[in-house]
Amino acid sequence: MAIKRGSKVDKSYSASAMTDLMFLLLIFMLIATTLINPNALKLMLPKSSNQLKDKAITTVSIQKVSAGYHYYVELDRVQGIEGVEAALKERLAGQESPTISLHCDKTVAVDEVVKVMNVAKDNDYRLILATQP
């Protein structure tokens, strides 16, 4: 009587688990890359159909928070409108009529925008109000 071995090693394998893993990695990478935003400030800009192609040298951003407003020159937070003026003078020293892009949230009051416009006018800066296309 011959004794047969009950278990034999199967040399084939299923690649379906590998494809599932690749799809999960692909979905993770797609979600992760859409969450990366080069602009650190989340602002809901007003919409406009007129878009200028002027290249701004620097940006000023106004963000509304519960306690008031935060002002940023580029990504650096400054204290109030005086801080905006001082930071712009430091960054734009020696340039003739530089262009500034003003980014402000829809919820920002118009008088805060006008304050930045006055700073630009007093220092002979050209000002562009950023909008969404």
Image (cartoon, helix red, strand yellow):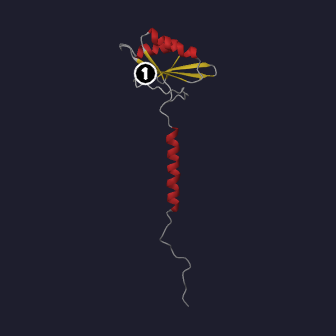
Q: Is residue 43 above or below residue 26?
A: above
Question: What residue occupies the far top of the structure in this picture?
Answer: 122
Residue 26: x and y in percent read 50, 50
Crowd around label 1: few <14 · some 14–19 · many ≥20 (10 Å): some
The x and y percentages for residue 79 are 53, 16
Q: Residue at x 57, y 16 (%)?
A: 110
For residue 8, above or below residue 65: below
In the rendering, at what x and y percent does residue 58 appear?
A: 43, 21
Q: Is 64 situated above or below 82?
A: below
Q: Nearer the viewer, residue 62 or 109?
A: 109
Which residue lies at the image location 58% right of the left edge and 24% below the top edge?
A: 106
Residue placed farthest to the front in the image?
Answer: 49
Q: Quadrant of the N terminus?
A: bottom right
Q: Residue at x 40, y 26 (%)?
A: 53
Q: What number of labels is visible?
A: 1
Q: Amino acid at mark 1?
A: Thr
Where on the picture, by quarter, is residue 109? Answer: top right
Instruction: Using the image as rendered, state which of residue 92 and residue 119 is in the foreground.
Output: 119
Residue highlighted by disc 1 = 58
Q: Secondary structure at mark 1?
A: strand
